[in-house]
């Protein structure tokens, strides 16, 4: 289990022990009933649209069942995505690469990285400029990792608590779009873990999942060859920090189809240029 998964489950358990969810689900059921009545009225003023009324009734019954088992349904969806993420990571690496990297980084610093850090500072202006990537990497990576775990739990808790209030608006034809946006955000949230595990598998595939792998390679992704070990680890930590920080944005673009649409539009725009080059 990834650390962010455990942290989020602890947050859900704390929410369930309080009186938040029973009250939220009851309010959601009231909103669902009002939304259904509004849908009935809209079908009436449109000349008795039976199809519209039947659609609203089906949504009302389905969402009523969902609200009755909301906590279980949310946990099952979260557990399904977590199981898929764990499968990807365990198949390729056998663990959490990012958490292992932070542990290895702390160990390397305690075993002599701090001495090398002060030696570089005493080397003059050029050494100070050279130590900046190492300093940024050693400080930025733990902050980014903890921030990802915190905002994963915060985002998930918000979706969990406010979910009954938002999905109850689905039968209302004017406000149903809010419920559909909630579903999109719920999918994007769960894709955070999937992309996280894909990054772990990628680092394991190129043999850069641990501090020892990077030190033995003497470079990072074929670049930064010849750098001092502590400086090389700092540079690698910066790249890993950027990878963690971009996970929410990548997940959002994938779920909304923006990443694929951007790639397709770019490819289509280049087709005439390629055709012209071939014709010439």
Image (cartoon, helix red, strand yellow):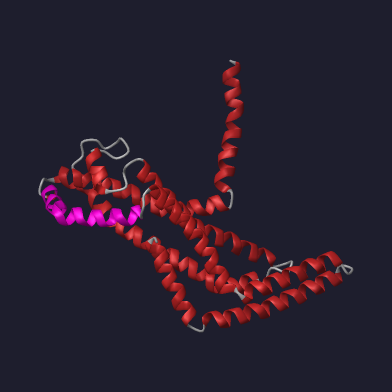
Viewer-proximal residue among 123 and 11: 11
Name the residue: 75% across, 68% down. 58
Percent position of residue 112, x then y: 13, 52
Name the residue: 64% across, 69% down. 167
Percent position of residue 31, x then y: 67, 77
Left or right: residue 47 versus residue 97 is right
Vertical position of residue 198 compared to residue 74: above or below:
above
Percent position of residue 227, x then y: 21, 39
Name the residue: 57% across, 44% down. 260
Vertical position of residue 201 compared to residue 191: above or below:
above
Left or right: residue 224 versus residue 272 is left
Instruction: Please state the total of marks drawn on the protein image.
Output: 0
Can residue 248 be seen in the rendering of this structure?
A: no
Decide whether the magenta segment is chiefly helix, strand or loop: helix
Q: Give the range drawn in magenta.
A: 96-120
Name the residue: 23% across, 52% down. 135
Residue 111, magenta (yes or no)? yes
Q: Name the image quarter holding residue 105.
A: bottom left
Residue 2, magenta (yes or no)? no
Percent position of residue 1, x then y: 39, 61
Quarter of the picture containing the C terminus is top right
Vertical position of residue 57 compared to residue 256: above or below:
below
Q: Name the image quarter holding residue 277.
A: top right
Residue placed farthest to the top in the image?
A: 280
Can residue 27 be seen in the rendering of this structure?
A: yes
């Amino acid at each position: 289990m990834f650390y962010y998964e455990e942290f989020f489950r602890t947050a859900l358990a704390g929410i369930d022990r309080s009186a938040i969810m029973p009250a939220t689900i009851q309010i959601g059921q009231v909103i669902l009933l009002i939304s259904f009545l509004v849908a009935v009225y809209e079908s009436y003023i449109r000349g008795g649209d039976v199809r519209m009324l039947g659609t609203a009734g089906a949504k009302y019954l389905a969402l009523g069942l969902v609200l009755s088992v909301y906590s279980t349904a949310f946990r099952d969806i979260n557990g399904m995505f977590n199981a898929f993420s764990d499968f990807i990571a365990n198949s390729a690496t056998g663990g959490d690469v990012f958490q292992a990297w932070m542990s290895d980084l702390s160990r390397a610093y305690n075993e002599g990285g701090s001495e090398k850090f002060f030696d570089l500072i005493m080397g003059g202006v050029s050494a100070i400029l050279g130590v900046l990537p190492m300093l940024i990497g050693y400080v930025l990576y733990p902050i980014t990792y903890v921030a990802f775990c915190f905002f994963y739990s915060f985002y998930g808790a918000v979706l969990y608590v406010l979910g009954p209030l938002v999905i109850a608006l689905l039968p209302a034809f004017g406000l149903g779009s809010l419920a559909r946006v909630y579903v999109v955000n719920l999918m994007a949230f769960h894709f955070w873990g999937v992309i996280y595990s894909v990054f772990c598998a990628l680092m394991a595939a190129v043999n850069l999942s641990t501090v020892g792998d990077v030190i033995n390679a003497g470079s990072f992704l074929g670049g930064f060859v010849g750098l001092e070990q502590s400086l090389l680890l700092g540079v690698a930590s910066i790249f890993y920090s950027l990878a963690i920080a971009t996970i929410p944005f990548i997940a959002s673009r994938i779920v909304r189809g923006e990443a694929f649409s951007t790639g397709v539009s770019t490819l289509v725009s280049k087709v005439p240029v390629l055709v012209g080059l071939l014709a010439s």
